[in-house]
Structure formats: structure tokens, C-alpha cells
């Protein structure tokens, strides 16, 4: 079998296992969330939403882009891994100490005293994650997402059971805290068991400078992205009742089951694979085009169908008290529609080493977001208005990404937009058809939901036979390769 065929099959199985891991993790977490949503109050989820930005920001600081620097290297040794490991661990401890002593000020900002202890305990996950970074890098380099899938399923399920038991005992927000800490601890333990890597007592300053010179721009970009992605929880937590943040947080988690799972899977698999063809622009462009068009073909209808059935799905699963989440969820689905496409665009920049452009894009998008959010807050818009701002910024970000990557590879802006617009029109038709039928058909809600999903899928396939044939054939080939 040729090296190209081996690489192709490796990419397919890598994507399948990576998506399976993330979908399993998100799926199990969501199933657990269903139980917790019926046992806890929206305020409990809102409290966690308030401090999510601190966990995400700290995690990015710990990794410092060095994990990505290691992944793109062709050969690595014990000194490389150990140097990055001790840097990650040291930074995580420093961050924990800082947050420990500043947590009272954070609680005062939100006017929620309970945040002090919650944040101090939850920040332990940052140190735990620091121990796991190298373990994950080694598995990603081997494109071994099967092992990560097993670990994620075990950790997600076990931590979920712990959270449910604590919720039944009346532990409130602490059941959510325990879920996060337990999941990360089990993940770290299993990664150590499966990978069996132990650091050496060495720190190579020369190697560190080399990796940091590549990674610091990714770090700055990552920190900016964390602020951009989590600023909504901060604003909603500060300006609106904590219950409203709870509704928003759960709507976001439901959206991420599909949107973030696919985009994260693509980032993790496409980056090491595209890196192998970084010196061959034609091959790099061809692989990128296939990924973009096939990803959009799968992701667009998936998230559209979820948005269309959400008026039935959310109250049915979470309970009637979560009905305010429906509109948030539908708007957030539009925001997340282009996430996987943006992820692939950004991976191209990392692959070809243009981390300077990567950083510049992050700065531009963040400045525009903050200006538009400032205007929305000044006009005293509701939460829905804030999400509309996110939609506009997501579309703007897509246009910027496409225009930049088209200059790096052989895929014109007009061609990219043409292929995406065709798929976008297709899912708009699907959404309209499903909503009309949902209003007109009067049967059991459970049966109606599955009927709508079936009809939506048939309509999408029918449209694709006319205007999206290439994407349909490419996806069918992918399915055949997976079955083999």
C-alpha cells in the first residue's frame, strides 16, 4: 500500500476516533447534564459560567502554544518533552496561587460570595491538565485518538455519576465542581497509565527558546480567543440575573455537542496531517479543499436540524423550566455554523508557520467584537441582541479567514464562498421546511421530533443531489473508507 494511501486511511481513522472521542465526551456530558438540569437550578450552572473564563485563560497560559510547537516537529526526544513539561507544570502552580489569592475580588465583581471557594477548588484542574499536556501531545503525534477516546469515555461517565450522586445529596453547585475536577483527574491518571511516559530532570533553555519563539504568538492568539469566546458569560453574569446566565450556559453546552466537537476533532487531526504536506503546496491545497467541503457538508445540516427541533428537544430533555434556553440555542447555532471552517482555515496558517498572521487575525476579530459589544451594551440590548452581535462577528471572521488563507494556498475566495453559500442555502430550506411542519403537525412530541429529523435529512439529501453532488460523493467515499 502506498504512503499516500496509508496517510489517507490514517487521516480518516484519526478523524473518526477524534470525533468519536469528542462526541462521546460531549454526548456523555450532555446526558449527565440532563439529569443535573432536573436536579439543580439554573443559578448553579450560571455560577460555573461566571468563572469559566478563568479556567480557559489559565489553561492557555499553561500550554503557551508549546504543545502545538511539539506536534509540528518531525523528531522529538526526552529533553524536548521534559523541558516543556516542567515549564507547563511551573506555570500552572504560579497561576493557581495567583487565582487563590485574587478569588475574593472576583467574587466581589460578580457579587457572589460563594465564588471564592468554588474558584479555588475548580482551579485545581489547571495543575492537573498541566501534567497531561505532554501525554496528549505524544498521542496526537501518533494520531492515536482511539486511546484518547477510551479515556474520555471513562472519565466523562465516572465524573458524571459522581456529580449526579452529589446533586441528589443536595450539594448544589459543588456537584458541578466535583464533576470537572474528577473528570480531569481520571483523565490524567489514565493518560499516565496508557502512555507510561515519565519526565527526566532536565530543562533545556535552548530548546525552550526555540519552541517558545514559535508558540508565543499562538499563546497570545489563544488568550485573545479565550477572552473573545468567554466574554459573553462575563457580561451576562455581571449585567443580568445569574439564572439567565444558567440558561445561556446550558444552551451553549448543547450547541457545542455538535459544533465544537467537530471543529476540535478537525483541529486535532488535520494539524498533524496537513503538517506532513506543508512543503508541497498543491497537495496541501488539495487536502484542505477536501476537508473544507466535506466538513461543511456534514456540519451544516447537523447543527441546522438540531436548531429546528430544539423547541421540542430542550423542554423534553431538560424540563419545561429550561424553555428560555431555546431561543439562545437557536441563535448560538448560527454562531457555531462556521466554527469548523474557521478551525481549518487557522490550521493552515499554523501548518505553514504563519503564526504572525494567526495572531493578527485574533487581534482584529477581538477589537471588532469588543467595539460591537460595547455598542450593544450602550443600547441596553437583551441577551438575544448580544448573541446577534456574535453572529455578525462569526460571519466577519469567516470572511477574514477565507481571504487570508486563499493567499497561502490554491483555493480562490470566490470558489470557497460559492461552495459554502450553496450549502448554506440548502440548510436554510431544510430549517424552513422543518419549522413549518413542526407548527402544522399535531402528534406526540417525541414522534414529531424524529419525524422532523427524518424529513429534514431527506430534504437535504434531495437538494444535495442537485446542487451539492461533489460534497455528497466525497462524503459517501469517506463512509466507504471507514467501513473498509
Image (spheres, rainbow, N blue to C red):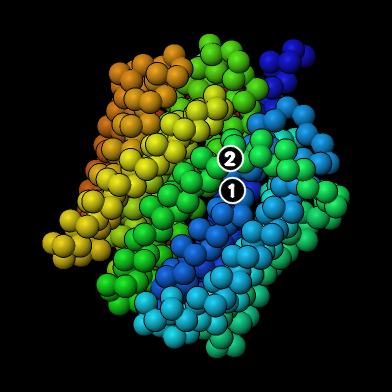
Q: From this viewpoint, which residue is outermost toward the front?
A: 205
Residue in the foreground of this view, choosing between 43 and 317: 43
Residue in the foreground of this view, choosing between 37 and 155: 155
Element assignment for label 1: loop
Residue 64 tag number: 1
Residue beneath disc 2:
215
**Circles 1 and 2: CB atoms closer than 8 Å:** yes
**In the shown orientation, is residue 91 left or right of residue 139?**
left
Q: Position of residue 6 (x, y in %)?
A: 72, 20
Residue in the foreground of this view, choosing between 80 and 387: 80
Q: Quadrant of residue 13?
A: top right
| Camera sees residue 144 | no
Could you tell me which residue is drawn at 42 percent across and 24 percent down? 405
Q: Position of residue 460 (x, y in %)?
A: 36, 33
Figure quadrant of the N terminus: top right
Q: Position of residue 483 (x, y in %)?
A: 67, 30
Amino acid at each position: 500500500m502506498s504512503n499516500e494511501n496509508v496517510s489517507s486511511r490514517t487521516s480518516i481513522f484519526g478523524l473518526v476516533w477524534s470525533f468519536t472521542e469528542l462526541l462521546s465526551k460531549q454526548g456523555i456530558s450532555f446526558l449527565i447534564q440532563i439529569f443535573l438540569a432536573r436536579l439543580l437550578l439554573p443559578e448553579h450552572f450560571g455560577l460555573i459560567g461566571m468563572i469559566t473564563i478563568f479556567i480557559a485563560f489559565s489553561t492557555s497560559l499553561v500550554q503557551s502554544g508549546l504543545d502545538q510547537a511539539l506536534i509540528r516537529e518531525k523528531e522529538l526526544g526526552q529533553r524536548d518533552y521534559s523541558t516543556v513539561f516542567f515549564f507547563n507544570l511551573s506555570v500552572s502552580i504560579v497561576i493557581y496561587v495567583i487565582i487563590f489569592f485574587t478569588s475574593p475580588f472576583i467574587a466581589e465583581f460578580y457579587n457572589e460570595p460563594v465564588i471564592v471557594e468554588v474558584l479555588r477548588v475548580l482551579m485545581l484542574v489547571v495543575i492537573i491538565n498541566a501534567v497531561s499536556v505532554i501525554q496528549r501531545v505524544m498521542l496526537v503525534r501518533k494520531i492515536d485518538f482511539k486511546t484518547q477516546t477510551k479515556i474520555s469515555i471513562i472519565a466523562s461517565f465516572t465524573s458524571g455519576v459522581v456529580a449526579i450522586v452529589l446533586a441528589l445529596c443536595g450539594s448544589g453547585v459543588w456537584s458541578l465542581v466535583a464533576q470537572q475536577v474528577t473528570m480531569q483527574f481520571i483523565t490524567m491518571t489514565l493518560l499516565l497509565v496508557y502512555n507510561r511516559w515519565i519526565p527526566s530532570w532536565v530543562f533545556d533553555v535552548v530548546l525552550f527558546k526555540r519552541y517558545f519563539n514559535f508558540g508565543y504568538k499562538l499563546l497570545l492568539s489563544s488568550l485573545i480567543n479565550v477572552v473573545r469566546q468567554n466574554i459573553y458569560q462575563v457580561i451576562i453574569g455581571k449585567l443580568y440575573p445569574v439564572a439567565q446566565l444558567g440558561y445561556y450556559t446550558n444552551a451553549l453546552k448543547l450547541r457545542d455537542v455538535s459544533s465544537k466537537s467537530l471543529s476540535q476533532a478537525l483541529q486535532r487531526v488535520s494539524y498533524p496531517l496537513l503538517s506532513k504536506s506543508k512543503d508541497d503546496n498543491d497537495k496541501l491545497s488539495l487536502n484542505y479543499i477536501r476537508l473544507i467541503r466535506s466538513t461543511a457538508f456534514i456540519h451544516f445540516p447537523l447543527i441546522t436540524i438540531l436548531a429546528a427541533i430544539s423547541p421540542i428537544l430542550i423542554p423534553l430533555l431538560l424540563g419545561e423550566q429550561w424553555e428560555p434556553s431555546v431561543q439562545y440555542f437557536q441563535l448560538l447555532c448560527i454562531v457555531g455554523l462556521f466554527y469548523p471552517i474557521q478551525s481549518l482555515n487557522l490550521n493552515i496558517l499554523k501548518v505553514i508557520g504563519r503564526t504572525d498572521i494567526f495572531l493578527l487575525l485574533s487581534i482584529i476579530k477581538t477589537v471588532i467584537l469588543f467595539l460591537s459589544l460595547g455598542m450593544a451594551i450602550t443600547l441596553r440590548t437583551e441577551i438575544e441582541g448580544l448573541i446577534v452581535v456574535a453572529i455578525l462577528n462569526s460571519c466577519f471572521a469567516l470572511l477574514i479567514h477565507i481571504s487570508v488563507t486563499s493567499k497561502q494556498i490554491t483555493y480562490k475566495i470566490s470558489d470557497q464562498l460559492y461552495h459554502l453559500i450553496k450549502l448554506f442555502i440548502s440548510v436554510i430550506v431544510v430549517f424552513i421546511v422543518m419549522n413549518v411542519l413542526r407548527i402544522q403537525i399535531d402528534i406526540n412530541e417525541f414522534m414529531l421530533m424524529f419525524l422532523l429529523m427524518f424529513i429534514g435529512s431527506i430534504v437535504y439529501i434531495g437538494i444535495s443531489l442537485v446542487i451539492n453532488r461533489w460534497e455528497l460523493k466525497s462524503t459517501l467515499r469517506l463512509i466507504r473508507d471507514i467501513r473498509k
